[in-house]
Image (cartoon, rainbow, N blue to C red):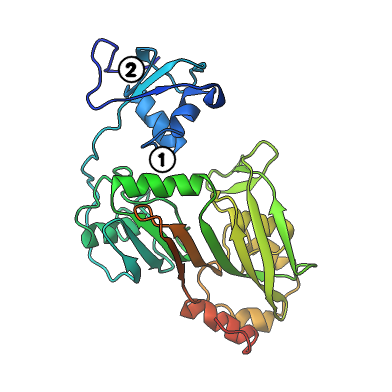
Amino acid sequence: MNNSKYTSSSPLPNSRRHIVTRETDGRLDQVLAELHGISSREMARRLILQGAVCLNGRPGEPSSRPKAGDEIVYTIPPPERTAIPAQAAELDILHEDAAVIVINKAPGVPMHPGPGHRRGTLVNFLLAHCVDLAGIGGTLRPGIVHRLDKDTSGLVVVAKTDSAHHQLAAQFKAHEIHRIYRAIVVGRPPRDQGTIDLPLARHKANRIKRSVMGEGKRAVTHWGVEARLDGFTLLRLRLETGRTHQIRVHLAHEGWPVLGDPLYGEARHRGLNLDPALMKRLDGLRRQALHAAELGFRHPITGEAMHFTAAFPSDLQAVLDTLSPTVAA
């Protein structure tokens, strides 16, 4: 039952009205997620459960199924103040303007606070750098439009206004963002390029992990070989979708786990008869060898095409130098 504090007799201030068309017929949370100001289905569901959405004058449920001609009235509440502490730190900023900030994230930095790490996250650092960021996109993940795993380095774009957040989220939803990753994997793909199109879902036995499952969400990773090394391969990967752990799960499923991946790779490493002396020289790598190397998007305000690159960080370049001195970042 919806515990809405709003009713048709108490209309929401600054509400927005949408008439459902045949093309948008579906669950209420799905329909709402496509409307102006709603950045994701998760946000749509949250607004519905907060009672900020009415369907034909009555509080809606996420599973309600509006029909063509039905009226949806919804309100996006103003940003809430976040309780996350600001924390000064040096950021590798590639671009910043009034709407967005593009950062080359260091490995070992979580994107936002969560269990076990309330401080030391990119959000903590951003709140100290951008004093007006609080509340954009939610109180726990202000400004965050997309994520990198804690131990994946590379490029992220952060929104500094609600409008920018919405516009960027729409580009991600429409798969219009250009994202290139580079990864050092254990093993040798049989071809020089290919596409992995396998659905992903939460692992049934380990909620931290994801796995390939027929009932999961579609996930597509395009890959190509940059260099074949001694028992390893340097891959260039383009994301068509952006599911949690997508690259790591896809590559491990194919039999080429990302080097140093503690969640999806270690057990597979043991079965590949790798040179023990070589593996000992790679012991200094303390994370998965995965880096977000390119990021392209349309500026959310001006529409200008933006493109950024970030070279391999020193720890991954050291691995390449160990495996093959001829491979450069």
Q: Is residue 124 left or right of residue 30?
A: left
Q: Is residue 54 at least partly visible in the picture?
A: yes
The residue lying toward the viewer, choosing from 243 and 315, is: 243
Q: Is residue 2 above or below residue 184?
A: above
CB under 8 Å between discs 1 and 2: no
> Where's the N terminus, which quadrant?
top left
Q: Is residue 72 left or right of residue 198?
A: left
The residue lying toward the viewer, choosing from 171 and 286, is: 171
Q: Is residue 156 above or below residue 183?
A: above
Q: Amino acid at mark 2?
A: Asn
Q: Residue furthest right?
A: 190
- Measured in 3D between alpha carbons, the distance from the residue under mark 1 to the one under mark 2, in whole angstroms, is 23 Å
Give the numbered dot on residue 3: 2
Q: Which residue is mark 1?
A: 39
| Disc with the residue nearer the chain's start (1 vs 2) | 2
- Give the class, few, some or many, for how many residues have Cα within 10 Å of label 1's Cα (few <14, many ≥20): many
| Residue 285 rendering spot, x and y as whole percentages | 53, 75
| Residue 126 rendering spot, x and y as whole percentages | 28, 59
Q: Is residue 329 above or below residue 154?
A: below
Give the numbered dot on residue 230: none
The label nearer to you, 1 versus 2, is 1
Identified at 22% across, 54% down, the residue is: 85
| Residue 190 rendering spot, x and y as whole percentages | 80, 67
Question: Element under label 2?
Answer: loop
Q: Amino acid at mark 1?
A: Ser
| Residue 152 rendering spot, x and y as whole percentages | 49, 64
